[in-house]
Amino acid sequence: MAAPPAAFAATAATVREEVAVRVAALKSRYADNVCGGTPGLAVVIVGERKDSQTYVRSKRAACEAAGIASFGYELPADSSQESLIDLIRTLNDRTDVHGILVQLPLPAGMNDEVVLDAIALDKDVDGFHALNFGRLAMAGRSPPRAVPCTPKGVIELLDRYGVDPAGKRAVILGRSNIVGLPVALLLMHRNATVTVCHSKTVNVGDLVREADIVVSAVGRPGYVKAEWLKPGVVVVDVGINAVDDATKKRGYRLVGDVEWEGALSVASAITPVPGGVGPMTIAMLLVNTVDAAERSFQHQ
Amino acid sequence: MAAPPAAFAATAATVREEVAVRVAALKSRYADNVCGGTPGLAVVIVGERKDSQTYVRSKRAACEAAGIASFGYELPADSSQESLIDLIRTLNDRTDVHGILVQLPLPAGMNDEVVLDAIALDKDVDGFHALNFGRLAMAGRSPPRAVPCTPKGVIELLDRYGVDPAGKRAVILGRSNIVGLPVALLLMHRNATVTVCHSKTVNVGDLVREADIVVSAVGRPGYVKAEWLKPGVVVVDVGINAVDDATKKRGYRLVGDVEWEGALSVASAITPVPGGVGPMTIAMLLVNTVDAAERSFQHQ
Ligand SMILES: NC(=O)c1ccc[n+]([C@@H]2O[C@H](COP(=O)([O-])OP(=O)(O)OC[C@H]3O[C@@H](n4cnc5c(N)ncnc54)[C@H](OP(=O)(O)O)[C@@H]3O)[C@@H](O)[C@H]2O)c1
Ligand SMILES: NC(=O)c1ccc[n+]([C@@H]2O[C@H](COP(=O)([O-])OP(=O)(O)OC[C@H]3O[C@@H](n4cnc5c(N)ncnc54)[C@H](OP(=O)(O)O)[C@@H]3O)[C@@H](O)[C@H]2O)c1
């Protein structure tokens, strides 16, 4: 994956085109189905966080571009958890909705777990249901209905750039349920030797120095020092951090966790921020939605 | 845990005594309950593997000793999977059965996953149901109803010997769903920095050399070389291997994965085989059964 950063944006675009082709095939084959063969994603947002609204807008736009129907629901921040769960139940029953995404974080006072576990397993396109997560964690059992989008995007990037993790040392920075932990599990299943670091890890740099693959999902600009990197290392930068930048109209710009300039001259490949994992995350949401639609149509 | 090996057997005995006290309390408080307040474990074995029969006998004897009712079921090796699942459904409905254990491995042709997922979540005292495993894997969600017995026993040994994994380097040898992976997840949740090794890992010795805690669950005698161990390391040997020994009546003896003699002089603590993790595994089964009974009695 010794590709220039621009290539990564192309990867997500390629995946989105592949999804569009699959969607078109479903529409022609299942035209007389209740939903005309159109995969449908319901996107639910509670409250008015600006960043969540931006993410939801990008996700819905990507759906439309691929021919996936997107159904938006905006609940006020002071909605009751019951009303949210009622909505989820209604969406669980709808035949034109194949995937349900509840944008996180939820307002304080709502219980993420209770809400996410209310989503029908088959429609859990984020893969956060505990049963799906259990299947992701265990080898040799049924695969999960869906793998969480960001970790799935990380693996897909490695795959498409011909990076085989087998036998490699992979160091994962961060252990969240959303990114760090599932990335670690997926790389372990791909036969990497995985070490997971977090805020209680001592001497993170010493561990990174041994890594053939580094995945950073910490959320701190400049956290990964270029001098920690072994020559030829593959770096996947999941972090998205806003740093002040007076030259920008918005007053800030987005950067990853890794010292970008320094890393560029050491790594054999590195994902840029913005443009690396972010677009892949959205592309994987589309893939998970089409997978769910194909399952519901019993498409072979 | 700089204790002589004998102390480890004492640990399992202590846990078993604690269980007996809890059982006695339940029997006196819930005497007028349908089952007289007695926790009950159903143990199901399919086929006639000698090792499985030995394990089942030890488990049932430990139940009886702690005052737990144990119900044994022996199905012939050629039973259908349906008949096994029918039995599990019956046990799921019984009010005097609080835990259900299906001894693995099942005969070829049966699907472990389908069988294990048929066990009611509340009675899954082995913790192998995918939903329980998902909860074990994820932090910050509801805890699983039960944590698998061997990994739970490993953590309990560390706890009772005052070994705090936080900030320590832990190297886990093996990544099975039964031992290696859940041990790794539990140590990560205890803030260790965890590396998981397996058959595709290159230079296992170099990784072990950096470890403050080594857990071996590979299943090969002498796999862990004494010269790999850092002075003061804590070694948990989960492996149980039969090696030929003409001086024994049975013609073999049981050993762990670790070069025992050499390791003794380097490690600050090491669990013996037999006698370390094995007895703790059985003790944890009793704990999980009493936990399940307390839940069913809604005991506070
Ligand atoms: N590209 C995308 O599509 C995408 C998707 C999701 C998230 N992200 C970005 O990825 C980053 C991580 O997201 P998240 O949801 O996983 O965040 P999170 O839940 O806050 O997790 C951050 C992880 O980093 C660890 N950490 C914090 N400070 C550290 C330190 N000094 N040294 C070592 N580890 C440290 C934390 O350790 P503890 O567990 O000990 O607290 C935690 O495990 C964020 O920048 C987020 O915006 C990007
Ligand atoms: N004390 C107890 O109560 C208890 C309970 C359960 C098990 N055990 C014992 O613990 C041991 C492991 O049990 P298990 O069920 O986890 O076994 P398993 O399913 O066979 O797993 C063995 C693990 O060791 C790895 N491995 C095999 N050869 C290796 C090598 N040369 N280098 C590095 N890793 C290697 C395997 O890697 P791959 O994944 O790449 O194949 C696998 O992950 C056995 O001896 C078993 O009898 C004891």
Image: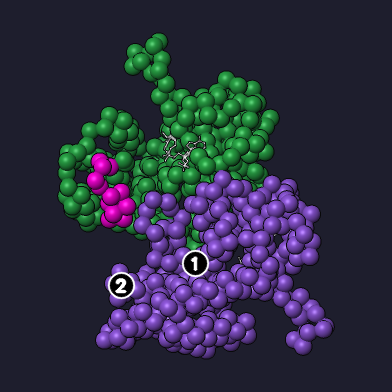
Chain colours: A purple, B green
Q: Is mark 1 within 8 Å of ligand 1?
A: no
Query: Residue visible at 73% across and 51% down?
Result: A231
Q: Quadrant of the C terminus of chain A?
A: bottom left
Most foreground residue, A68 or B118: A68
Q: Which mark, by number, is residue B76? A: none
How crowded is the residue under tag 2: few (<14 C-alpha within 10 Å), some, or many (20+)? Answer: few
Q: Quadrant of the N terminus of chain A?
A: bottom right
Asked whether residue B251 appears in the rendered view, the answer is yes
Range covered by the magenta-colored residues: B106-119
Asked whether residue B8 appears in the rendered view, the answer is no
Q: Is residue A61 above or below residue A191?
A: below
The amino acid type found where label 1 is placed reads Pro
Residue A163 at x, y = what percent? 58, 56
- Residue that lies at the very extreme toward the top in this rendered image: B247
Q: Nearest to the eye among marks 1 and 2: give it.
A: 2
Q: Which residue has dot 1 on it?
A: A148
Most foreground residue, B226 or B281: B226
Q: Is residue A218 above or below residue A242?
A: above
The amino acid type found where label 2 is placed reads His
- Ligand number 2: quarter of image: top left
Q: Is mark 2 within 8 Å of ligand 1?
A: no
Q: Secondary structure at mark 1?
A: loop
The chain containing the residue under callout 2 comes to A
Q: Is residue B112 magenta?
A: yes
Q: Which residue has dot 2 on it?
A: A299
Q: Is residue B1 above or below residue A108?
A: above
Query: In the shown orientation, is residue A177 left or right of residue A70?
Result: right
Residue A292 at x, y = what percent? 38, 73
